[in-house]
Image (spheres, helix red, strand yellow):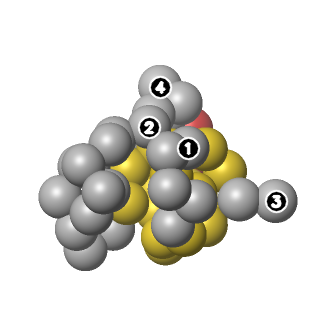
Amino acid sequence: MSQTNAASKLFAVCRSCDSVYVAECQPDGRIRPIGVSADCTCGEGEFEAFE
C-alpha cells in the first residue's frame, strides 16, 4: 500500500461537545476516532482536526 492510501493519525475534536480523541484521517478526508465507535460518546459523529 502506498503512503497516499494510508490513514494519517491526528487529534480530532467533536464538533458538538468539543471532546478530543486520537483519530485517523482517511484518504477520503473522513476523520474517525481510534478506540471508540464511529460516533463520539455524546452521540454525534462529526469531527474536525484539533489545532
Q: Does residue 1 show up?
A: no
Crowding around mark 1 (Cα neighbors within 10 Å: few <14, some 14 to 19, many 20+) is: some
Q: Amino acid at mark 1?
A: Arg
* Cα–Cα gap, marks 1 and 2: 6 Å
Q: Position of residue 31 (x, y in %)?
A: 47, 44
Q: Which residue is mark 1?
A: 15
Crowding around mark 4 (Cα neighbors within 10 Å: few <14, some 14 to 19, many 20+) is: few
* Cα–Cα gap, marks 2 and 3: 16 Å
Q: Which residue is mark 3?
A: 51
Mark nearest the camera among 4 and 3 is 3
Question: Which comes before the other along the chain, label 2 or label 3?
Answer: 2
Crowding around mark 2 (Cα neighbors within 10 Å: few <14, some 14 to 19, many 20+) is: some
Label 2 sits on a secondary structure element that is loop
In this view of the protein, which residue sits in the foreground, 18 or 28? 18
* Cα–Cα gap, marks 4 and 3: 20 Å
Q: Amino acid at mark 4?
A: Asp
Residue 12 placement, left or right of 37: right
Crowding around mark 3 (Cα neighbors within 10 Å: few <14, some 14 to 19, many 20+) is: few
Question: Which comes before the other along the chain, label 4 or label 2?
Answer: 4
* Cα–Cα gap, marks 4 and 2: 15 Å
